[in-house]
Amino acid sequence: MSRRPPFTPLPLPSRRGVVLGMAVVALSGRAFPALAEGGVLVVTAVGDLPGFLPREVAPFLAIVMNTAGKNTPGGGQSFVAAGAATPDGAASDRVEWTFRANPYAAGASRSVGPPRSAAGRLFGTHRLISVELRLYRGGRYQAQVFGQVEVQGGRRDADLQTFVSDMTRRILDAAAQ
């Protein structure tokens, strides 16, 4: 039985001010051949995403990630929601999204204009969330990407869709290096 060398971290610069940091782990400097060939990755989600019920998050992410994954050089990945692919939710080839709502400062402050409920319906309520995306291949951790985004929430939120696409491209690019 041959023994694999230990993982070594590769530093990568962040591309935008929105992304807090990025870490990639590679197997002795080689690219992951399974990612280059394409394949199916199971999408799981932890935490609350504004505008979605907990059961709706993973299917929404899978739909947006499929579009981004096919348009990424070296991509060709297919994504499927965890509930449809694996009943136990512990697939060996998966991406895990973790959402954390940042503190919200719109408390009992005085405001001038329409009531907050009417303003929320007209203009939408935007929330700042922190996001962590991890990639696992064969049950082993491969890469991780962090970011923050201000979203209104829901399926029609263009900022959220753009952010999910950007995070998908980043994780696939990081894993392909």
Image: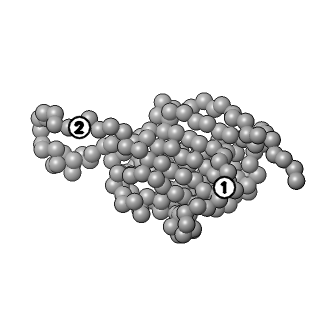
- The image's colouring method is one colour
For the point 43% across and 58% down, which residue is it?
Answer: 57
Give the amino acid at mark 1. Answer: Gly
Q: Which residue is mark 2?
A: 106
Q: Is residue 128 left or right of residue 67?
A: left
Q: Percent from the top left, x then y, of residue 147?
A: 48, 39
Q: The residue tagged with tag 1: helix, strand or loop?
A: loop
- The CA span between labels 1 and 2 is 41 Å
Q: Where does residue 44 sit, x and y in percent of width and height? A: 52, 57
Q: Which residue is mark 1?
A: 139
Q: Quadrant of the C terminus?
A: top right
Q: Position of residue 9 (x, y in %)?
A: 69, 35
Q: Local crowd at mark 1 within 10 Å, few (<14), some, or many (≥20)? A: few
Q: Of 3 and 55, which appears nearest the observer?
A: 3
Q: Nearer the viewer, residue 46 or 32?
A: 46
Label 2 SS: loop
> Which x, y percent locates residue 50?
35, 51
Residue beneath the point at 58% across and 61% down: 90
Q: Is residue 44 above or below residue 104?
A: below
- The residue depicted at 39 percent of the width and 51 percent of the height is 49
- Whether residue 17 is visible, yes or no, is yes
Name the mark nearer the viewer: 1 or 2: 1
